[in-house]
Image: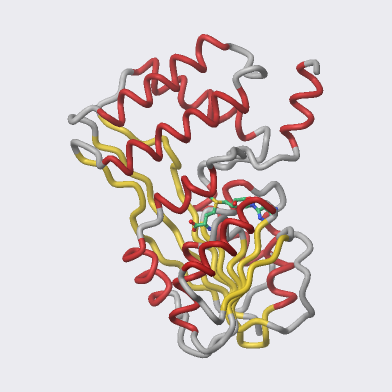
Amino acid sequence: MNLWMVRNQMADKYIMESPFEGERVRRKTDTEATISQLNALGLIKGMHSLDIGCASGAVTLEMAKIAYPAKVIGIDRSEERINEARTLAEKKKAKNVEFVTGDVYKLPFAKNKFAFLWNRFLFEYLKKPINALEEMKRIAKEGGYVVTGDLDGNSLFHYPIDSNLGKGLYNVTRFLSEFGFDAFVGRKLFHYYQTAGFSKITPYLMQHHLIAGTPSIAEIENWTEKTRTIRKNFGSIYPDKEELEFVLLGLEKLIKDPNTFTYSALIFMKGEKA
Ligand SMILES: C[S@@+](CC[C@H](N)C(=O)[O-])C[C@H]1O[C@@H](n2cnc3c(N)ncnc32)[C@H](O)[C@@H]1O
C-alpha cells in the first residue's frame, strides 16, 4: 500500500484505533469523577438514556446504575469495543443496559426517544460536529437533554517544557487535525450547540488531566498507550519521521518527569430540546 492509500484509509478511521483501545479507555476511566459529572449534568433515576461513543462501556454501566430501572443504551462504531462492553455488562450483571454498534451521524433510533443523551471524549474526533448534534437532537425527547463533554488543550499544556518539544507537539497536533482530531474542541462546543439550535444551553468547566509531579501507574500507561497508537497509526505517513519520534519520546519522558505539571480542561455543554 502506498502512502496516499494509507493516508486515505486513515482519513475515515478513528485516529486512536488499536486492539488495545477498549482496555485503555476502560482503565483510564475515573469512576468517581464520572459519577459526579453525570450527577452534575442532570442524569437521574428513570431517564431513558444513550451513551454515544461508549467504547468498552465503563461509563454506560455507571449511567445504568443511576438511571435504573430505565434502560441505558451504549453505542459505538467499533464492533470490537461493543463486544467488550457486552462482556463487561454480563460480568457486572447489569440488567438495564444494552450495547449496539452504530455511527453518531446516523443513530439507529426513532425521533423523540431519549430523555438524556450523553457523549464524552467523542467530539475531539468528529469532522462534522454540528451534524452529530443535529442527529442527537432528532432522537432526544422534547425537554430532553443532549450533553457533550470534551477537552480543551488535549495533551498540549505542560510546564516546564523544552521549546522544541513544545513546537513539535503543536506540529503533530496540526497534522492530526487533518484527520479530524481537534485538541481545542472544548471551547467550540457552545457555538456548536447554538448552531444546532438548542434552546437552553448550559456550560460547565471541570478538570481532566491534572498531573503535578510523579504520575500514577494508570496515567503512565494511558499516555504510553496513546503515543504507541499514534506512532503505529501515523508513523508511516507523518512527513517528518524524526520530528514525530522526538515528540512521542519527549512526551513519554515529560509525563514521567516528577517536575512536570500537566493539565487539560474538560468542558461540558448541556442543551435542552425545545
Ligand atoms: C475516547 S473513546 C470514548 C470514551 C468514553 N466515551 C469515555 O467517556 O470514557 C472514543 C470512542 O468514540 C468512538 N467513535 C469515534 N467516532 C465515532 C462515530 N462517528 N460514531 C460512533 N462512535 C465513534 C470510537 O470508536 C471510540 O470508542
Residue at (57% x, 42% y) in the render: 182
Q: Residue at x 61, y 79 (%)?
A: 199
Left or right for 187, reference 17: left
Quadrant of the rendering where the C terminus is positioned:
bottom right
Which quarter of the figure has residue 118? bottom right
Residue 142 coordinates in the image, percent (x, y):
67, 87
Q: Is residue 68 left or right of residue 31?
A: right
Q: Residue at the top extreme?
A: 242
Residue 29 occupies quadrant: bottom left
- Residue 190 vertical placement versus 230 (above, below): below
Taking 247 as reference, is 38 above or below it?
A: below
What residue sits 57% from the left and 76% below the top? 97
Question: In screen coordinates, is 192 left or right of 69?
Answer: right
Q: How far across and down, in percent of the image, does residue 169 sit? A: 46, 25
Residue in the foreground of this view, choosing between 229 and 207: 229
70 over 183 or under it: above or below: below
Query: Which residue occupies the foreground of this view, 89 or 189?
Result: 89
- Residue 32 placed where, x, y %? 32, 66
- The picture places residue 146, in percent across and down from the top left corner, at 59, 73
> How many marks overall?
0
Question: Would residue 61 be found to the left or right of residue 144 on screen?
Answer: left
Tell me if I can see residue 131 in this picture: no
Confirm whether residue 144 shows in the render: yes
Quarter occupied by residue 98 = bottom right
Q: How is the image coloured?
A: secondary structure
User: Which part of the image, by quadrant, shows the N terminus?
Assistant: top right
Which residue does the image show at 21% across and 40% down from the upper left? 212
